[in-house]
Image: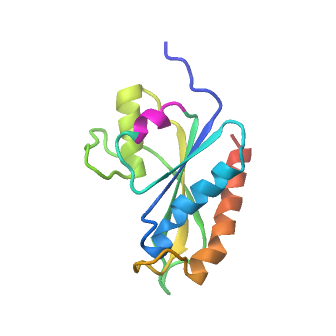
Amino acid sequence: MQSLPPLSTLIIGYGNTLRSDDGAGQAIAETVESWGLEGVSSLAVHQLTPELAAEMAQSRQVIFVDVYPSTRDSPQGVQVTAIAPGEKNPTLGHASSPQSLLALCQVLYQTTPVSYWVLVPAENFEFGESFSPLTTQNIPLALEEIQTLLSCR
């Protein structure tokens, strides 16, 4: 019988820090890490890779943080979605989705942490290291959503 992971949460913020708003996921993960919360660890990564499944298997909850392209026709607020494993035979490419990482975690480690996707609206993906006003105003809201998810663990 497999033992359950400790009461812990893993935050995985990802994106390209050299492409303006795309780096917000990493910035949010770094902020959560600076809080120094017991049982919470954060990773700021450029992309989701299969190696992350091993760390995910050690957690009861995983929160993925990324951006989504905001348009006039799309909602412009922070979105929080529960996510489940994707395909049952995940591919092992250089970049993965949260769903494929969860499936990999399930196949390799026979565990599936409760998982959420926190998505921040973004509008600037040009080369640069600063965030647009839209992303900047939504980062504190994303951090509030993460605090809410952490309080429910």
Q: Residue 135, image x and y in percent? A: 58, 75
In the picture provided, is 124 more to the left or to the right than 104?
A: right
Q: Residue furthest bottom?
A: 72
Residue 11 drawn in magenta: no
Instruction: Report the colour scheme.
Output: rainbow
Q: Residue 148, image x and y in percent? A: 72, 53
**Count of marks, rendered view:** 0
In the picture provided, is 85 more to the left or to the right than 152?
A: left
Magenta stretch bounds: 52-58
* Residue 57, placed above or below residue 86: above
Q: Quadrant of the C terminus?
A: top right
Which residue: 49% across, 12% down?
1
Q: Residue 151, image x and y in percent? A: 74, 46
Magenta stretch, main secondary structure class: helix
Q: Residue furthest top?
A: 1
In the picture provided, is 47 more to the left or to the right than 2?
A: left
* Residue 93, placed above or below residue 141: above
Q: Nearer the viewer, residue 77 or 125?
A: 125
Which residue: 46% across, 81% down?
124
* Residue 128, placed above or below residue 72: above
Query: Which of the 4 image quadrants contains residue 103?
Result: top left
Residue 55 drawn in magenta: yes
Which residue: 55% across, 81% down?
132
Q: Residue 24, image x and y in percent? A: 54, 66
In the picture provided, is 138 more to the left or to the right than 53?
A: right
